[in-house]
Image (spheres, rainbow, N blue to C red):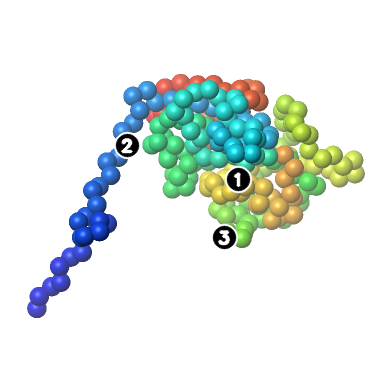
C-alpha cells in the first residue's frame, strides 16, 4: 500500500515554491533596558495622530520600544528596550512574569470580594488566573494629575495586586467585576524590576545584570 507524500509545513509562494524561512532577528550590539515612570494621561506609544501626550514627550532614546503596555489612565513602571528577545520575555504570557500594582478602589471590599479577586474573577474574555491580593496602607505617592474624584462619604481602599498575565485594562476590569472599581492604578513592579524612587515622568537606564 503506497503512502501519500508528506506535506511540507512551510508556506508556499504562488507557483508551489516554499517561502524562504525568516532568519531570527539578531540581538542588538548594545542591548538597552529603560525604566520609565509613566504619568497618568500619557499614551504608551511614541506618536499620536490626535496630538495627545506620548512617550516621545519624555524619552529621547532612539530604537527603544515599550515592552508591554500601561493604559492611558494608569501610572507607574513601564519598561522599554531595543532587544526583541527581552521584550518577549517581559510580555509573553508563557513566562508568567509577575506584575504588581497598587490599586485605590472605591469602597471597602469585604472578605468575599477579596477572595473572589484572588481566585481570578471571570471577565468577558474568559476567567483570569489567580492573583495575589492584599489590603495595604495608603502608599506615599506623588499627587496625581488630574486627581481622582473625591467623595467625602465614600471610603477608598488601597490594594496590592499581583497578576501573571497582561490583558487589556485587566486589573481595572478585575476589581470592577467584584464590585470595587479602581480609581487610581500604579504599577510598581514587573518581574525583578521595581519602580523604586523614580519620579513621575523620569526614566533611568537599568544595569547590565538586569539582562540575566
Q: Residue at x 42, y 40 (%)?
A: 88
As measured in the structure, the alpha-carbon distance from the residue carrying label 2 to the one carrying label 3 is: 33 Å
Q: Label 2: how many residues lie within 10 Å, few (<14), some (14-19) or many (20+)? A: few
Q: Label 3: how many residues lie within 10 Å, few (<14), some (14-19) or many (20+)? A: few
Q: Is residue 9 left or right of residue 91?
A: left
Q: Is residue 34 left or right of residue 40?
A: left
Q: Are marks 2 and 1 in contact (CB under 8 Å)?
A: no
Q: Is residue 56 visible?
A: yes
As measured in the structure, the alpha-carbon distance from the residue carrying label 2 to the one carrying label 1 is: 36 Å
- Mark toward the start of the polypeptide (3 vs 1): 3
Q: Residue at x 27, y 41 (%)?
A: 23
Q: Label 1: how many residues lie within 10 Å, few (<14), some (14-19) or many (20+)? A: some
Residue indicated by mark 1: 132
Quarter where residue 123 is shown: bottom right
Percent of width and height locating residue 174? 65, 52
Residue indicated by mark 3: 126
Of the pair 92 and 19, the residue shown nearer to us = 19
Residue indicated by mark 2: 25
As measured in the structure, the alpha-carbon distance from the residue carrying label 3 to the one carrying label 1 is: 19 Å
- Mark toward the start of the polypeptide (2 vs 1): 2
Helix, strand or loop at mark 1: strand
Amino acid at each position: 500500500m503506497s503512502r501519500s507524500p508528506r506535506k511540507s509545513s512551510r508556506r508556499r509562494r504562488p507557483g508551489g515554491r516554499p517561502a524562504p524561512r525568516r532568519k531570527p532577528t539578531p540581538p542588538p550590539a548594545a542591548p538597552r533596558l529603560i525604566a520609565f515612570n509613566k504619568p497618568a494621561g500619557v499614551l504608551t506609544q511614541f506618536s499620536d495622530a490626535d496630538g495627545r501626550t506620548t512617550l516621545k514627550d519624555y524619552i529621547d532614546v532612539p530604537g527603544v520600544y515599550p515592552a508591554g503596555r500601561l493604559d492611558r489612565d494608569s501610572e507607574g513602571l513601564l519598561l522599554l528596550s531595543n532587544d526583541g528577545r527581552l521584550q518577549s520575555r517581559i510580555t509573553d504570557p508563557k513566562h508568567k512574569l509577575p506584575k504588581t500594582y497598587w490599586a485605590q478602589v472605591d469602597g471597602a471590599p469585604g472578605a468575599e470580594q477579596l477572595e473572589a479577586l484572588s481566585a481570578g474573577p471571570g471577565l468577558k474574555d474568559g476567567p483570569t488566573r489567580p492573583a495575589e491580593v492584599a489590603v495595604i496602607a495608603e502608599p506615599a505617592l506623588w499627587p496625581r494629575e488630574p486627581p481622582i474624584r473625591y467623595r467625602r462619604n465614600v471610603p477608598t481602599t488601597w490594594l496590592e495586586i499581583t497578576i501573571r498575565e497582561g490583558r487589556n485594562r485587566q486589573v481595572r476590569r478585575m476589581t470592577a467585576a467584584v464590585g470595587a472599581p479602581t480609581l487610581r492604578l500604579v504599577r510598581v513592579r514587573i518581574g525583578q524590576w521595581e519602580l523604586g524612587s523614580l519620579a513621575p515622568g523620569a526614566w533611568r537606564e537599568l544595569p547590565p545584570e538586569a539582562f540575566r
